[in-house]
C-alpha cells in the first residue's frame, strides 16, 4: 500500500519528534571526563526536578535493591555507580518523554503496552544474567524501548496506525506482519530512526532495529537475540500486551546463543516473573 | 534516635502500629485446560517450530504450577 520507505520518510519529516531531556546529554558528557565527581552528576540530574524525583523513586525501589535507603541523587550516584545512574536517568527520561500524553488509538491499550515493555526489559535483564552478560542494564533498556516505534506510529501517524491495528484484529496476526503487509515499513524501522536520532549506544540501536529478525545482524547479535527472546517469553507469560495476541517464532540460533533448554526454562520463567513484579515500579513513575 | 534513647537508659523499645494493608488483587482461577487452550491459540501459527513446542510446554508447566502454589 504505502510502499517501502514512505513511512520512514514521513517520520523523518516530522519536526516535533520528541527528544530526550538535555540533562541526559550533559550527564553523558560529564561521564566521559574521569575527573567528574558524584556531586557534579548529582547536581546535573537535580537541575531537572521532575526527572530527579523519578530517579530517586527508582533507586529506592526493590528493583534496584535499596528500598527506601537513598535520600539524595548524589548518594545514589555513590552507591550505584556512574554507569547505572546513567541507565536509570535514560530509563526515567524515556518515561518522562513518552508515558504522558500519547494519543489513544482504538484497539491499542497504552497501559498494557507499557506493562509489556517494562516486562520485556525485566525479561531481557534476566536472560542477560542467565548467560553471564555484563550488559544487564543495557539489556533492560533495550527490552524497554524495543517497541518504541509503535508509540511513534500511534502518536504521529494515527491514521496509519489505526489501519494496522484494525488489520491485526481482523486477521489475528502480529502487528509486525500487519505493518509489513500494509506499509512495508515496521515499528522496528521507525524505532530505529528514533534511537539513532537520540544517539543511543549502537547496541541498543541494533536491538531495536532487529528484534523481529535477530539473525539479520551479526553485530550486537547477543543483545538483539536477548530482546527477541524476551519479547517472546513475555508474550507467552501474558505480561501486558504489545498490540496483538500472537507470538513470533524463535530462531534456533537464538535459543542456542542464550543457552536455553527445557530444563533451564522453568527457573528462568520464575525469575522473570519475580523481576517483572519488582519492575512494576516503572509503571508508577 | 536509637543512640539518644540508649543514652537515656532505654534499652528496649516496643513499637506498636498497624500493618499497611495492600489491596489484594482478585485471584482469577483458571483451570489447566483453559491455560492449555489459551496457549495453543496463541502458539497456533508457530507449532511447526520444535523450540516453540518446548516453550509452550514450559510455560504451561510454569503457569499451572503457579496457579496451585
Image (tube, rainbow, N blue to C red):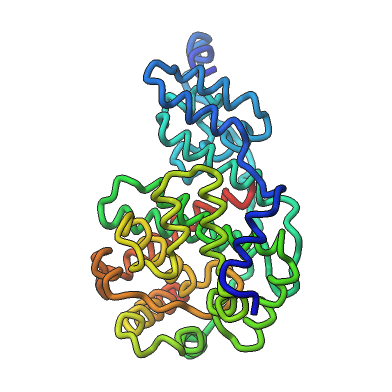
Q: Quadrant of the N terminus of chain A?
A: bottom right
Q: Quadrant of the C terminus of chain A?
A: top right
Which x, y percent locates residue A175?
A: 57, 75
* Rendered view: A6 above or below B35: above
Left or right relative to A29: residue A5: right
* Rendered view: B47 above or below B14: below
Which x, y percent locates residue A184?
A: 56, 74
Residue occupying image coordinates x 47% and y 58%:
A208
Left or right relative to A214: residue A87: right
Q: A240 and A184: which one is in front?
A: A184
Q: How many marks?
A: 0
Residue A263: image quadrant is bottom left
Residue occupying image coordinates x 56% and y 83%:
A173
Residue A84: image quadrant is top left
Residue occupying image coordinates x 47% and y 35%:
A86
Left or right relative to A264: residue A23: right
Which x, y percent locates residue A195?
A: 52, 50
Q: Given the current orientation, which residue lies at the most extreme top position?
A: B7
Which x, y percent locates residue B2?
A: 50, 18
* Rendered view: A193 above or below A166: above
Amino acid at each position: 500500500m504505502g510502499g517501502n520507505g514512505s513511512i520512514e520518510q514521513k517520520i523523518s519529516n516530522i519536526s516535533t519528534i520528541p527528544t530526550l531531556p538535555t540533562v541526559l546529554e550533559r550527564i553523558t558528557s560529564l561521564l566521559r571526563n574521569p575527573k567528574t565527581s558524584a556531586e557534579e552528576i548529582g547536581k546535573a540530574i537535580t537541575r531537572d526536578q521532575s526527572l530527579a524525583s523519578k530517579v530517586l523513586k527508582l533507586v529506592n525501589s526493590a528493583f534496584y535493591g535499596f528500598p527506601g535507603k537513598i535520600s539524595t541523587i548524589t548518594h545514589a550516584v555513590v552507591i550505584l555507580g556512574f554507569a547505572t545512574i546513567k541507565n536509570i536517568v535514560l530509563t526515567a527520561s524515556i518515561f518522562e518523554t513518552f508515558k504522558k500524553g500519547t494519543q489513544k488509538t482504538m484497539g491499542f491499550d497504552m497501559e498494557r503496552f507499557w506493562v509489556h515493555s517494562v516486562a520485556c526489559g525485566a525479561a531481557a535483564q534476566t536472560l542477560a544474567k542467565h548467560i553471564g552478560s555484563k550488559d544487564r542494564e543495557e539489556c533492560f533498556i533495550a527490552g524497554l524501548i524495543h517497541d518504541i516505534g509503535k508509540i511513534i506510529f500511534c502518536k504521529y501517524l494515527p491514521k496509519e496506525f489505526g489501519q494496522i491495528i484494525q488489520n491485526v484484529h481482523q486477521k489475528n496476526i502480529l502487528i509486525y506482519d500487519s505493518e509489513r503487509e500494509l506499509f512495508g515499513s515496521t515499528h522496528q524501522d521507525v524505532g530505529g530512526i528514533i534511537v539513532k536520532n537520540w544517539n543511543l549506544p549502537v547496541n541498543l540501536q541494533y536491538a531495536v532495529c532487529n528484534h523481529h529478525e535477530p539473525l539479520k545482524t551479526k553485530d550486537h547479535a547477543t543483545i538483539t537475540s536477548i530482546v527477541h527472546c524476551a519479547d517472546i517469553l513475555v508474550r507467552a507469560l501474558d505480561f501486558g500486551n504489545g498490540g496483538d495476541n500472537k507470538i513470533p517464532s524463535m530462531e534456533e540460533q537464538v535459543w542456542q546463543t542464550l543457552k536455553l533448554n527445557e530444563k533451564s526454562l522453568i527457573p528462568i520463567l520464575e525469575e522473570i516473573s519475580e523481576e517483572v513484579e519488582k519492575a512494576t515500579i516503572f509503571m508508577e513513575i | 534516635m536509637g543512640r539518644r534513647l540508649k543514652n537515656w537508659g532505654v534499652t528496649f523499645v516496643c513499637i506498636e502500629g498497624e500493618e499497611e494493608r495492600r489491596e489484594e488483587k482478585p485471584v482469577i482461577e483458571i483451570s489447566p485446560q483453559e491455560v492449555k487452550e489459551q496457549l495453543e491459540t496463541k502458539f497456533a501459527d508457530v507449532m511447526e517450530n520444535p523450540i516453540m513446542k518446548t516453550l509452550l510446554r514450559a510455560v504451561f508447566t510454569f503457569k499451572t504450577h503457579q496457579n496451585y502454589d
